[in-house]
Image (cartoon, rainbow, N blue to C red):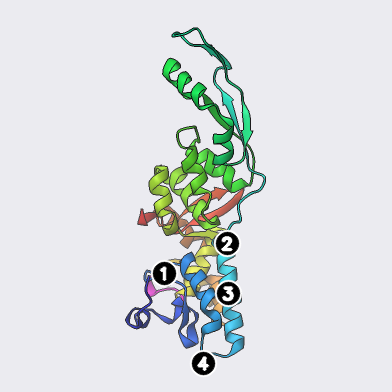
Amino acid sequence: MKWTTRYKDSLPDSHFLIPKYRALPYKNKQGTVSVSHVRNALARADQVKGVPMKDINAAIKKGEKILEQHGGYQRNGSDKLKLHAQPHALDFESSDDDDYFVVKSFYFKDLDDYEKKYDKDTVEEYDRLLGQEVYEIKFISGDPLEQQLFKAMDVSQENLKEYFDALDMDEGGLNGMTVLMEELGMDAEEARERAVEVQLYKGKPDDYAEELIDDSGGPSAKQAQMYFDYDSLRRDDFQGTDEQLLARYFDYEAFARDMETNGKISVVNIDGTDYVFTNPMDF
C-alpha cells in the first residue's frame, strides 16, 4: 500500500516500531501486525532521519523479533525436497492395437524434473483407457512446511504445479495458506491468494494476550473489570510498577480463553509448534 501522510497521521503511536518519533509503521489500521509492513519498515530503517541511532537499532531488533514471532522470514526453498510418482498400475494393455505398456515409478524434486521423467504418451493412454491418474504422488523428504502444505493440498497429478508454485512463498505465506486450508477448509487457490492476510503469533494464547494488552497501552476499563484480581491486590497491598502489577494480577489466561471461546483467536499447530491464529474472524 502507499503510505500517505494522512494515513500515517491516522495511526496511533503503538503502530510504529519507533513510537516516540512515529517512525517505521508495522501494523495495519486495525492494529494487527502485518508481516509485509514489518519487512518494509526494516528495509527503510537506514533511511530514517532525525532519530537517534540507538532507537533505530532497537527498532531493527524489535522488527526482526516480530518477523521471527510471526513466521515472516523469506525461505530459500528446500534442497532436500523429494517426491515419488508411484503408478496405480504397473502395467496395462491397450485395447486398440494390443500394445503393452509398462509404467515406471520415479523420484523427482521439482516440476521440471517430473515432466522430464514421465512418459507423456503412456500417461495419456493410461488416462484414456482406465479413466484415472497414472501416478499417486508421495512425499518422501523435505522441510516440514513443504510436507504440511503437501498434506493440506492432498497433492496429486492434477494440482502438482499448483503445489510447486505455492512453494515460492515465504514461511509466513506457507503457514497462512496451510492454516486457511486446514482450519477453515478453504480451497488452495483462495488460500494462497489470502495467505498474506493470516496473522499468526508463535507462542501460547496467554502470551499473545499479554502482548495484545501491552501494545494497547494497558487493559480497557471493561477488560480490567473482567480480568483484574482487585481482591488479591487489596489483600497484598502490592507496591510496584504498572508492568509488575499487570503481570501479577491480570488474568491473561482467562482473557485468552474467552477470546478463543468467542472465535477471536484459535490455536493451530505447524510442525509441532503452537501458533495463535489471531484474526480468524477476518475470513
Q: Which residue is mark 1?
A: 223
Q: Nearer the viewer, residue 106 or 26?
A: 106
Residue 147 % position (x, y) = 58, 42
Q: Main secondary structure of the magenta part?
A: loop
**Comes first in the chain, label 2 or label 4:** 4
Give the SS element for disc 4.
Answer: loop
Q: Would you say residue 220 sits in the magenta stretch?
A: yes
Q: Is residue 201 magenta?
A: no
Horizontal side, residue 224 vs residue 108: left or right:
left
| Whether label 2 touches label 3, CB < 8 Å | no
Between circles 4 and 3, the one closer to the viewer is 4
Q: Is residue 90 above or below residue 143?
A: above
**Nearest to viewer (mark 2 / mark 3):** 2
Quickly name the residue at label 4.
50
Q: Residue furthest front?
A: 97
**Label 1 is placed on what type of residue?**
Gln
Residue underneath mark 2? 73
Part of the protein shown in magenta = 218-222
Dot 4 alpha-carbon crowd within 10 angstroms: few under 14, some 14 to 19, many 20 or more: few
For the residues labelled 1 and 2, the Cα–Cα distance comes to 34 Å
Amino acid tagged 2? Tyr
| Residue 62 marker | 3
**Considering the numbered disc 2 on the image, is that residue within a helix, a strand or a loop?**
loop
243 is higher (above) or lower (below) than 277 = below
